[in-house]
Image (tube, rainbow, N blue to C red):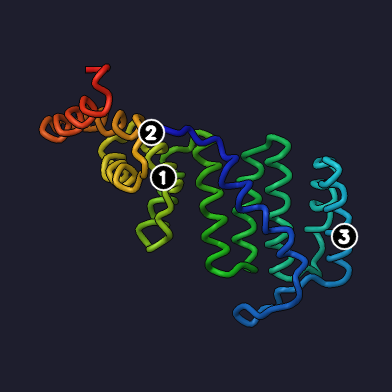
């Protein structure tokens, strides 16, 4: 089973964040989703620093910028997302987690955007050893109708197993197993382990039979 460290989903999600920060105006719940000329120029300067791998300098500039009372909620949410990305690049995952949480609290995001950041936060929590908290956030998202992407379910199962909450892990592991195409040895091994742990001998026997057919050399 994959051990997530935070990199994959964060890098995928952050790829579009900064570009979106400098888009033209749009309306979201009556709020302007637009950077002012001054804030946009400051963010462009930060982008140049980041592109030169000067992430600490970028963080310093953004921390100064976020103190401005002239920023609108959209600007604040975007700047906090950028802070989260750069703190993450510097290996400060707990600071990055707080930045992404602040991005949601700033109130400048659409619901779908907030959901995406929530997934990033969950992954950071799990990477920081907050297995139960990360699992809670992911499970709430999925149970509320969030997109059941295989990597999200994999992440949730990983968190539950790391927390040694095997009963909670099992139904999600079964979803992970059913969605896997093709199914790998890790999928079978996990269900075999969980069925054994939960005393589900009949289900374990079914999995073992399938494993014996697939990998006869391991009988």
Q: Residues within 10 Å of mark 2 (few under 14, many from 20)?
A: some
Q: Residues within 10 Å of mark 3 (few under 14, many from 20)?
A: some
* Rendered-image quadrant of the N terminus: top left
Residue named by callout 2: 163
Mark 2 residue element: loop
Q: CA distance from mark 2 to mark 1?
A: 9 Å
The residue located at (80%, 53%) in the rendering is 62
The quarter holding residue 110 reads bottom right
Question: Given the current orientation, which residue lies at the most extreme bottom position?
Answer: 30
Q: Is residue 199 above or below residue 182?
A: above
Q: Residues within 10 Å of mark 1 (few under 14, many from 20)?
A: many
The quarter holding residue 20 reads bottom right
Q: CA distance from mark 3 to mark 2?
A: 43 Å
Q: Position of residue 157 (x, y in %)?
A: 37, 40
**Which mark identifies residue 42?**
3
Residue named by callout 1: 135
* Rendered-image quadrant of the C terminus: top left
The residue located at (39%, 56%) in the rendering is 142
> Pointer 3 and pointer 2: residues touching (CB < 8 Å)?
no
Q: Earlier in the sequence, mark 3 or mark 1?
A: 3
């Amino acid at each position: 089973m994959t051990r997530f460290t935070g990199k994959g989903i964060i890098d995928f999600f952050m790829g579009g964040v900064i570009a979106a920060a400098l888009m033209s105006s749009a309306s979201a719940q009556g709020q302007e989703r637009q950077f002012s000329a001054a804030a946009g120029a400051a963010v462009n300067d930060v982008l140049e620093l980041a592109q030169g791998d000067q992430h600490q300098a970028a963080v310093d500039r953004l921390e100064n910028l976020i103190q401005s009372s002239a920023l609108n909620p959209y600007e604040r949410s975007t700047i906090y997302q950028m802070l989260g990305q750069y703190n993450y690049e510097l290996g400060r995952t707990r600071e990055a987690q707080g930045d992404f949480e602040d991005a949601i609290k700033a109130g400048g995001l659409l619901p779908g955007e907030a959901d995406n950041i929530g997934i990033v936060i969950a992954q950071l929590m799990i990477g920081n050893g907050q297995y139960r908290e990360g699992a809670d956030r992911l499970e709430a998202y999925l149970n509320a109708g969030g997109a059941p992407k295989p990597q999200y379910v994999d992440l949730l199962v990983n968190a539950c197993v790391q927390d040694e909450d095997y009963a909670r892990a099992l139904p999600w592991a079964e979803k992970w197993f059913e969605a896997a195409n093709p199914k790998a040895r890790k999928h079978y091994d996990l269900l075999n382990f969980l069925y054994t742990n939960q005393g589900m001998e009949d289900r374990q026997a079914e999995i073992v039979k399938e494993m014996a057919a697939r990998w006869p050399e391991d009988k």
